[in-house]
């Protein structure tokens, strides 16, 4: 039995996670680590890099053990729409504020899926916007304009 590991999506994803986690650990090694109670600037990237390495190793081993070809058909439309959703968020956020940007981003991203139900997407946009406003504006007190640059909450 000949293994074709070049087309194994689990192995490739595992190697990618291992690489990203390894880079995070290497970059963070020059920063003070600290402890769990008094975290230094190197604590979070080192721990997160270690977790990514662990997940990457698990995926790579799973990919080697399964050793099967993926049956994925690539479609450009979802990738393009997800990238467009990020761009739309940035453009709308700078001009109209946080809530319209989240609503626009949610609708553009939802177009990338196979099913688009307007009521579900609208409910998701409202819930996402409410959650983001509570977390970013009220809890973290970030100075984001909510709508059209005139609703600032401190």
Image (cartoon, rainbow, N blue to C red):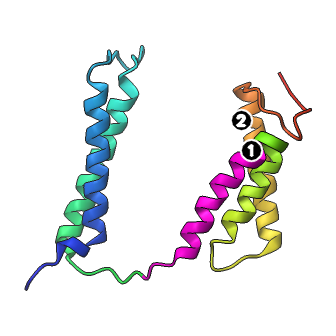
Instruction: Kindly state the secondary structure of the residue where label 2 is placed.
Output: helix
Q: Residue 112 occupies which quadrant of the picture?
A: bottom right
Instruction: Kindly state the secondary structure of the residue where label 1 is placed.
Output: helix
Q: Would you say 109 lies left or right of 6 here?
A: right
Q: What residue is shown at x 30% (from left), y 42% (from top)?
A: 21
Front one among 123 and 76: 76
Q: Residue 52 occupies which quadrant of the picture?
A: top left
Q: Residues within 10 Å of mark 2 (few under 14, many from 20)?
A: few
Q: CA distance from mark 2 to mark 1?
A: 6 Å
Q: Is residue 124 above or below residue 43?
A: below
Q: Is residue 57 above or below residue 140?
A: below
Number of numbered tags placed on the structure image:
2
- x and y percentages locating residue 64 in the rendered image: 17, 69
Q: Give, as a single range, the part of the protein colored magenta.
A: 73-93
Q: Would you say 134 lies left or right of 15 here?
A: right
The numbered mark at residue 131 is: 1
Q: Is residue 11 magenta?
A: no
Q: Residue 44 occupies which quadrant of the picture?
A: top left
Q: What residue is shown at x 28% (from left), y 60% (from top)?
A: 59
Q: Is residue 68 above or below residue 62?
A: below
Q: Residues within 10 Å of mark 1 (few under 14, many from 20)?
A: few
Q: Would you say 147 lies left or right of 69 here?
A: right
- x and y percentages locating residue 134 in the rendered image: 77, 36
Q: Main secondary structure of the magenta part?
A: helix
Q: Is residue 42 above or below residue 128?
A: above
Q: What residue is shown at x 72% (from left), y 28% (from top)?
A: 139
- Residue identifier under label 2: 135
Check the image and name the residue furthest to the right.
Answer: 150
- x and y percentages locating residue 87 in the rendered image: 65, 53
Q: Would you say 40 lies left or right of 150 here?
A: left
Q: What residue is shown at x 53% (from left), y 75% (from top)?
A: 76
Q: Are marks 2 and 1 in contact (CB under 8 Å)?
A: yes
């Amino acid at each position: 039995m000949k293994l074709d590991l070049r087309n194994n999506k689990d192995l490739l994803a595992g190697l990618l996670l291992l690489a990203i986690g390894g880079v995070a650990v290497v970059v963070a090694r020059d920063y003070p680590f600290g402890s769990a109670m008094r975290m230094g600037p190197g604590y979070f990237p080192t721990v997160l890099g270690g977790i990514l390495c662990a997940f990457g190793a698990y995926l790579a081993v799973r990919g080697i053990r399964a050793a099967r070809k993926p049956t994925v058909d690539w479609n450009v439309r979802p990738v393009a729409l997800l990238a467009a959703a990020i761009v739309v968020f940035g453009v709308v956020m700078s001009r109209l504020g946080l809530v319209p940007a989240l609503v626009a981003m949610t609708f553009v991203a939802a177009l990338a899926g196979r099913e688009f139900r307007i009521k579900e997407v609208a409910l998701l946009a409202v819930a996402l916007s409410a959650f983001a406003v509570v977390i970013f504006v009220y809890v973290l007190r970030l100075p984001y304009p909510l709508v059209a640059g005139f609703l600032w909450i401190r």
